[in-house]
Image (spheres, rainbow, N blue to C red):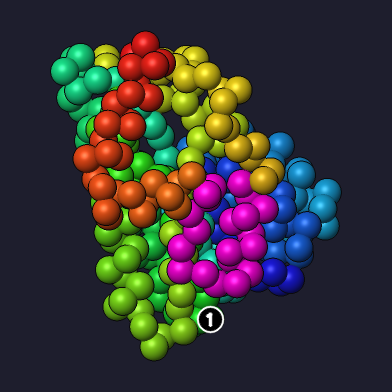
């Protein structure tokens, strides 16, 4: 990572902030992007304390022009781009039949899917010039249906399909594509999740003490996959077993998911 220029969207908290700090410790140049430049200040300080060069760019990934300006700032500051980490995202937690604000489907698609498309579109020529890496922080919800997450799962399925397709188009160019599929990670994304009325639920609707990976462990796995230029990272053995079961016994996977939802009283 020494001297590599890396853009991270959604860098103000959670996985994005921890990833920035870990890459900074490896000598990367960081372009930290999120909607609020002020909220990125603490992350920038962590990166600089680790000896890295870092800039912050206020970026709403749902705005193509904002994504273009972010890439321009990266080029103006560092002269090239080696990696784009599409990490910006938002979630939801509601039964489909309870939803009263259908615009949340469009909102999640614009942030989780189209935001990654916009950023990738403007960064790709520069990444190709350096035979770099595209990273998509997706979710296990991008691989299988998850109750209470219809909009979120749909947006992550779209993200998975886009980057799988783009990987094929980029064969022979020297650019690799890594899709990361975490499960539940100890961040506040679920407290920020949108409820049936399209407003943040403000507190997690699940037991965060169970089956939740700490953010440092999650990011360490991501960095290892980046260094190896892997094509995919599926976290936890349970998730890998679930992917296999989906192929051979999809109905069983559906029943397991439904039972888990009922046990939570949702």
Residue pictured at 36% horizontal, 83% vertical = 171
| Residue 28 rendering spot, x and y as whole percentages | 70, 64
**Range of magenta residues:** 218-237
Magenta span includes 198: no
User: Mark 1 sits on what residue?
Assistant: 130
Q: Is residue 66 visible?
A: no
Left or right: where does residue 238 sit relative to residue 200? right
Left or right: where does residue 119 sit relative to residue 135? left
| Residue 22 rendering spot, x and y as whole percentages | 72, 53
Q: Residues within 10 Å of mark 1 (few under 14, many from 20)?
A: some
Q: Is residue 21 above or below residue 196?
A: below
Q: Nearer the viewer, residue 88 or 239?
A: 239
Q: Quadrant of residue 122?
A: bottom left
Left or right: where does residue 188 sit relative to residue 92? right
Magenta-colored segment: predominant secondary structure: helix
| Residue 188 rendering spot, x and y as whole percentages | 55, 27
């Amino acid at each position: 990572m020494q001297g590599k220029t890396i853009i991270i969207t959604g860098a103000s908290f959670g996985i994005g902030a921890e990833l920035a700090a870990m890459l900074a410790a490896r000598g990367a140049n960081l372009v930290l992007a999120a909607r609020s430049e002020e909220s990125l200040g603490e992350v920038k300080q962590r990166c600089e304390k680790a000896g890295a060069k870092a800039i912050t760019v206020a970026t709403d990934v749902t705005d193509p022009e904002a994504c273009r300006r972010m890439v321009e700032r990266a080029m103006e500051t560092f002269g090239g781009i080696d990696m784009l980490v599409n990490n910006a995202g938002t979630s939801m937690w509601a039964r489909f039949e309870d939803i009263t604000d259908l615009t949340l489907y469009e909102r999640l698609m614009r942030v989780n899917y189209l935001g990654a498309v916009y950023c990738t579109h403007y960064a790709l020529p520069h990444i190709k010039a350096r035979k770099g890496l595209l990273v998509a922080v997706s979710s296990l919800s991008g691989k299988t249906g998850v109750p209470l997450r219809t909009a979120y799962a749909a947006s992550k399925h779209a993200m998975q399909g886009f980057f799988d397709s783009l990987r094929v188009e980029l064969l022979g160019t020297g650019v690799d594509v890594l899709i990361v599929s975490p499960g539940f990670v100890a961040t506040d994304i679920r407290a920020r999740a949108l409820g049936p009325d399209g407003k943040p639920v403000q507190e997690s609707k699940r037991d965060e003490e169970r089956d939740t990976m700490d953010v440092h462990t999650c990011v360490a796995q991501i960095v290892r996959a980046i260094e190896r230029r892997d094509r995919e990272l599926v976290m936890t053995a349970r998730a890998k077993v679930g992917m296999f079961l989906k192929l051979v016994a999809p109905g069983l996977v559906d029943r397991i998911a439904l039972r888990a939802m009922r046990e939570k009283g949702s």
